[in-house]
Image (cartoon, rainbow, N blue to C red):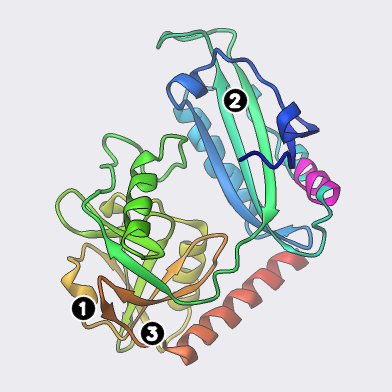
Amino acid sequence: MIDNRPVCLDGKILNETDAMTTAVQSGLFYGAGCFETMLAENGFIFRFNEHMDRMYAALQYLGLPEELFPDKRKTKQDIDDLVKHCGFDNRRIRVRIQVSLIEKEGYDYDDHVKTMNLITAAPAADQNYPATLFQTKTRVVPDICHPAHLKLSNMLHYRNAFRKAQREGADDALMLTTNGFVAETATANIFWKKGNTVYTPSGLCDILPGILREAVIEIIDRNDSYTIQEGKFYSTALVNADSVWLTNSIIELREVKSINGITYPIDEQFMNYLKEALNKVKELEQQL
């Protein structure tokens, strides 16, 4: 159902039903586009430049000339204007930037390529409660086939896995690589702790290495009381974990209470440490 919310299309704020674009475009036919999702808090977006740099890498992969890349400053201003127009100024807002290519039909290069730039904003969902995960048969796509580190528009494997998990009564789907290693969930990166060691799948596991994931790795790496280990792990490694949690730019940090019926304790002391450390990192960035 369309709620006719305001959106920003190519720099103009319009009602959703008034936001029109051409029907013939490779973004629609082939998913030739990319996106970023980020959390806006009182006008601040954590590591906004990193989000935009990843989008630039995706647009370069898609073959878009650099002069057509969305400008960082203009994009941030468009986000601020949209959030203000919606009356969301002092709330946690989920912002999505979508850039889709408008090209002639077919796979040939188009010397006259254009883009559709769409920004949406909505209150971020409250996901403060611990998550339940269900391991689905849907696997992540190997990086050699689809660059996993980029947020390209065609993410149907994540959508499929997420919906399968929902049908099982879970909040998210645990996904493995094609050769059976733990990768990520349909919406987040995954971490677990055993003793004083924190584990997370490495980039060799065809993951989308999130911006919050990198921030958490940096926090743990700076603490002499813990070690961080990135690698390839079978799902059996999760069975005896002391605690498990997820990260992405919207939820930031979310505890996991069960995976396929196996329950995990919530390590409130460690999670509070991570949350406090992350807030300090965010505060320092705001001061720059």
* Residue indicated by mark 3: 226
* Residue indicated by mark 2: 66
Write down the region rendered in magenta. Answer: 77-85
CA gap, disc 1 to disc 3?
20 Å
CA gap, disc 2 to disc 3?
42 Å
Instruction: Give the SS element for disc 3.
Output: loop
Q: How packed is label 3: few (under 14 Cα within 10 Å), some, or many (20 or more)?
A: some
Instruction: Give the SS element for disc 1.
Output: helix
Instruction: Give the SS element for disc 2.
Output: helix
Q: Are marks 2 and 3 in contact (CB under 8 Å)?
A: no
Q: In the image, is residue 19 above or below residue 200?
A: above
Question: Residue 245: horizontal and vertical position, in percent?
Answer: 41, 74
In the displayed image of the protein, which residue is found farthest to the front? 1
Amino acid type at circle 2 is Glu
Q: In the image, is residue 255 above or below residue 230?
A: below
Amino acid type at circle 3 is Tyr
Q: Residue at x 20, y 74 (%)?
A: 237
Q: Which of the numbered marks, if any, corresponds to residue 239? A: 1
Is residue 14 shown left or right of residue 145?
right
In the displayed image of the protein, which residue is found farthest to the bottom? 269
